[in-house]
Image (cartoon, rainbow, N blue to C red):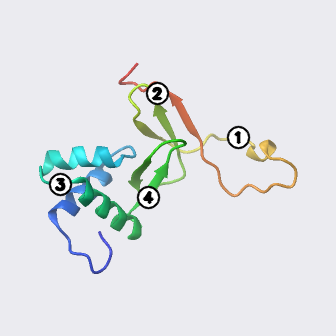
Amino acid sequence: MVKIGQRQTRQRSIIHDIIMESDRPLTIANLVTLAQKRQAKIGQATVYRTVNALIEAKEIQAVQMPGGEALYEKAHLHHHHHFKCNNCGKVYDLPGCPDGIDLKKFLPPRFSLTAHEFTFYGTCAECA
């Protein structure tokens, strides 16, 4: 679960499990709040250290939202995009990628596309 040479602790297990059980990417603040519900003494520094170890172990990945902080989700998910609620700020995974869109037509001449990311914005079901 964590990089070789690091001790497995209950706190690290809690943070790992929270990310693996989540159906959406989480911020550090989300992780601290959820972890403290399971064990009150988990602090922000522990969450940061654990997140960095899980990234190095390639168990989770960072999702960088435009103009926002990094969020963290399970690694090795299939290609997908995200939806950010303009009201509550939560970010949700969207399944897959829109089919039938020729993204190359949006590129200037002689540009080569290697990857893409889409972020959709609106109101989530909870805020609607």
Mark 1 to mark 4 CA distance (whole Å):
27 Å
Depth check: give the residue in front, 104 or 29. 29
Q: Considering only order in the chain, which callout, 4 or 1, is on the residue closer to the N terminus?
A: 4
Q: Considering only order in the chain, which callout, 2 or 4, is on the residue closer to the N terminus?
A: 4
The label number, if any, that marks residue 100 in the structure image: 1
Mark 2 to mark 1 CA distance (whole Å):
27 Å
Mark 3 to mark 1 CA distance (whole Å):
46 Å
Mark 4 to mark 3 CA distance (whole Å):
21 Å
Q: Amino acid at mark 2?
A: Asn
> For mark 3, what is the residue?
42
> For mark 2, what is the residue?
86
Residue at the spot 51% in from the left edge and 54% down from the top edge:
78
> For mark 4, what is the residue?
61
Describe residue 58's horizontal placement relative to residue 108 as left or right.
Answer: left
Residue 97: percent from left, percent from top: 59, 44
Mark 2 neighbour class, 10 Å CA radius: few under 14, some 14 to 19, many 20 or more? some
Mark 4 neighbour class, 10 Å CA radius: few under 14, some 14 to 19, many 20 or more? many
